Each structure stands twice: as structure tokens, then as C-alpha cells.
Image (tube, rainbow, N blue to C red):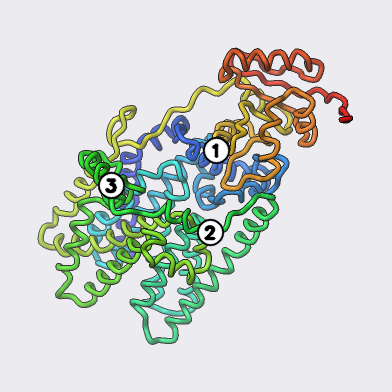
Amino acid sequence: MAAAAGLRAWMRALLIGAGLVFVMTAPTLSGLTTTGRLDTNDGRHGIWNVAWIGHALLSPSASVFDANIFHPHAGTLAYSELNLVAGLLGLPWYAATGSPLAAYNGAAATGLVLAFVLMWALVRRLTGSDAAGLVAATAFTFCPYVAARTPHIQLLMIFVFPLVLLAFPRMADRPGAWRGLQLGASLAVAALACGYYGLFAGCALGLVSLLFAQRRRAYWVGLASALLMAGVLVAPVYGAFSAARAASGADVRPWDAQDAANYSANASAYLASPAFAHQWWLPALGRWQPWSEVLFPGATLLLFAGLALRLTRSNPGDRRVVAGYGAVAIASVWASFGPKGGLYLALFHTVPGLSMLRAPSRLGIVVAFALAVMAGYSVARLGRRWRWLPAVLVVVLVCELGVKTTEWGWPSWPLRTTAPLSPAYERLAELPRAPLVEYPFPYVSSNFHNHAHAMYWSTYHWQPLVNGYSDLIPDDFRRMALPINGFPDPASFEIMREREVRYVLWHVDTYNPDARAVLEDRMARYAAYLRPIVRTETDWLFEIAGYPERVTPE
């Protein structure tokens, strides 16, 4: 009977979480294959990333690390964060639909449902209240931080925090090597889901493990086992990641204090939110201090987290947990202010791997997580007197945290409907695999991010692209980005020859009349080497049928 009741509780949490994700992130699931964050290059890059992993895992001839950008470079997936966990979450959606948008949207929705269920399970375990877990899960899963980061799939993998901190009390209650290995596996999942979150979860776990330390030898054996397991699981992936980046030829910049300062929180960031209910104070907030980030945890969450400090005074055990998570929240706020706050610099010099991170402000999600745990204790206490309160609070949180956009109504995420697939891309999907160059080809470094357009559309044909955009840009790409724009001419033909390019696609509707006239003149002069495949009013797809003889300079 107890097992059946427990299963029903898990299923109830899963159904409520899935329903809320469907509503609060609309049209993520209702527009599964047609909508995405197509208004930003980060969003296009994320869609490409998740879809590439799905494509590579389903294609025997493809290698996950050797993504289809920056041809002929190998290991190009490692030029940015790998997003392996998001790719795995999106795999079933991609396999079922073949849609890159479904891969991204499905990964995001699955990650948020996991966040809801795991947060519910953590607070339920700590407080003994199913209802309190539902309130805490709602407050955490749909906090303003999440709604502000819809283009960044790795930052939507917030489920890793309750995953790790749920494994900790299981280990602490029955300490030993086996439970420690499970804790380490959860930490490895966090690291592979998002490098930032892996380190943040590790720091939170370190603080909690010290605050709730036990004298038993088995406790410390469990923690040591966790570190060992996390290292064993992450090290091979990190080794391949580092090797690919080193082989890129790109200049990997060392940690810069100014970079960290630029991406640090400020006071107004903890009052900024995209939620419709919070819009009224943003103009005044901007006049006081422009916010550097969006980190407001929510008014309802702040209220009930604060009440927990008072309501748990009579229970030393609960009081200790609330105080512990309060310490996590305070430390996270402090560190999120970056080098100027002091704590971040101390962590930088003591925590391995922190030197790779440039955005201390992302610690704001740890603040929301810790406050949600604290709020769960308040709801558990008050829910004993007013049993209707948790249900009302879930509705209040939905109303407070919903994001309104003019296109989709309320609540919704700021997604856009994709354009119809061009005949050129349809034809590319049918042609033999060979390198492709897509024009316009951005050549100014500050404009490289616009290569994400070509990357997104490549998810419909998966031809190898000379185009590319990532955190790392290979040096040879920077050198050839300008001269390749002269194609067809002798210098650009040599670039194409070196990269064995076969297909060239021009989006001629983006050219002004003068630029189009220059292109047509060049193509007329080199018509013998270019075979038309698709020619519409907007797109010209050509195959390089041959190369002119090399001209030896005098």
C-alpha cells in the first residue's frame, strides 16, 4: 500500500509538472515543430547544437564531436559548450519528428518537467509535505531567471540542482560508498548538462556537506566516493573537449577579471524580471540603476522563504535545514557580484575549473533554488492549518511568474514561427554530402554570430558547412572570412579548393542592387566553373563544377 501511494504521489507530481510546463512555456509544446527562439543567434545556435547531437547519435556515419561547422575542422562541437545532456533529452523528440525545433523544444520541456518533479521530491523529503513540494517546485521551475534564458538550452537544465541536493540527504541518511557513488553520478550529470551548473552545484554541495557534516567515517567515505565517481565520469568527456579546443588553432583567452566584472550581478539585477506581473516597476528600476542581469526570484517566493526563518524556530532540525539553505542563498548572492564582491575571487583561487567561467551572475539560479527549499518549510507548516493554501499558492505563482508576449497571448515564451523551408535547402538534403559555403558570409569578428543563420538552416540538410559561429573561432577562419567574400574570383576559388567545397548558396534577396550587380558580373566571367542547381528570386544554389588554373604571382 505504501509503495502504491508513493507511486501515485510521483505520478501526480509528474502530471502537474507536465501540465504547468505546457501552459507556462507555450508554445514550446503546442508549436513543437514550428516555433523556437529564432529571433536571436544564441537561440539558433542552441537549436543547431541540440539537433546535431540527435542527428549524430542516429547517424552511424556521424561523430558527435565532429559537428558540421567550420569545415574542414574536426571536434567543432567542443568550440562551445557541448550540451550533451540536452542533446540526449532532445533525442526522442528528434527521432520521432526529424525536426530540429522539436529537439530543442522537447529538451527544454523535458528538462523543466524534471526540474519540477525533482524539486518536489527534494522538498517533500525534507518537509514531509507533498503539497509544499508542489509549491516549491512551481516557484523554482518557472522563476524569472528561467524565463529570461529561453535561447540558452544549457541554462534551462536547472533540474541538476534538485538532482544533486536530493542525492545528498539520501547519502547522509545512509552514508557509505554506494550512496556516495550515486551522489557523484548526479554531480557528473550536472557538469555534463552545463559547465556553470556543475561547478555551482558542486559548490552548493560542498557548503551543505560541511554545514551538515557527520563524525561517522561512512559519511566522509561517501563524500570521497562522490568526488571519485564524478571525476571518473566527467574526465573522459572533458579530456576530449579540451583536446578539440586545443586543436582548433583558436586563441583561447585566459580568465580576465574585467570579463567577470562585465558579467556580474548588480543590486538592480535582483529586482529585474520578464514576468508580466513585475513589469510595472521596471521603468523606475532602470532609472535607479540599469540591471546587469535578470535575477529576481519572485515576490511570493521571497515572502515564504522569509517566513520559514520564523515558522521553524520551534523545531531545531527544520531550523537547521532552513538556515543551511539560507546560507547557500546568501553565499550565492555574494559570489554573483563577481570580483568586486570578494567571495568570487576567493572561490576562483580555490575551486578547480572556476577559471573557465565568465558570468558570476548566473549564480542567481542557485539563489532561487535555495529560497524555494526554504519556502517549502513555510508552506508545510501553514498548510497544516489551511489545507487549501498550497493549491492557492500554485495559482498565485502561475499568475505572478507568467510571461506575456503580444504574439501568443498569456502566459507564453517569446518564440517565433519558422519560415517555410527554401527549395535550395530541400535540394541540399537530397544531394551527396559535400562542403557548402553559404552567403552572405559575415567577415567582421563582431558580426560572426550571424553565421548562426546558416547553422540553423543546416539542420534541415546537414551538409558540412564552411560557415560557423561558436565561442572559439579558428584562426584560419578569421583569415579567410574576408577574401572568401570575393567568390567567384581567383583568391576565393583557392579557398574553396583548399576546403574541397562543392556547393555554394547565395541568399540574393539580402544583397542590395549594386552588390547583386557585382555578383552577377563575377558569375558571368566564371560561368564555366559553376553549375546551377536551384535558382529562385531569393536563393541561388550552385555546384562548383571545376576550378580555374592556379595563377602564379610574378
Q: Tell me which numbered mark, 2 or 3, is placed earlier along the sequence.
A: 2
Q: Tell me which numbered mark, 3 or 1, is placed earlier along the sequence.
A: 3
The amino acid pointed to by label 1 is Ser
How many neighbours does mark 1 have within 10 angstroms: few (below 14), some (14-19), or many (20 or more)?
few
Residue at the left extreme of this rendering: 385
How many neighbours does mark 3 have within 10 angstroms: few (below 14), some (14-19), or many (20 or more)?
few
* Element on which disc 1 rests: helix
* Element on which disc 2 rests: loop
Q: Position of residue 480 (x, y in %)?
A: 70, 36
Q: Position of residue 68 (x, y in %)?
A: 65, 40
Reading the image, the residue beneath label 2 is 255
Q: CA distance from mark 3 to mark 1?
A: 27 Å
Q: Would residue 111 appear left or right of 477 to someone viewing this image?
A: left
Q: CA distance from mark 2 to mark 3?
A: 27 Å
Q: In the rendered image, which quarter contains the N terminus? A: bottom left
Q: In the rendered image, which quarter contains the C terminus? A: top right
* Quarter of the rendering containing residue 544: top right
Reading the image, the residue beneath label 1 is 446
Q: Position of residue 472 (x, y in %)?
A: 60, 47
Residue at horizontal 28%, vertical 47%?
Answer: 289
Reading the image, the residue beneath label 3 is 289
The amino acid pointed to by label 2 is Trp
The amino acid pointed to by label 3 is Gln
Q: Would residue 82 appear left or right of 159 to someone viewing this image?
A: right
Q: Would residue 279 appear left or right of 518 to someone viewing this image?
A: left
Residue 95 visible here: no
Residue at horizontal 31%, vertical 32%?
Answer: 405
Label placed on residue 58: none
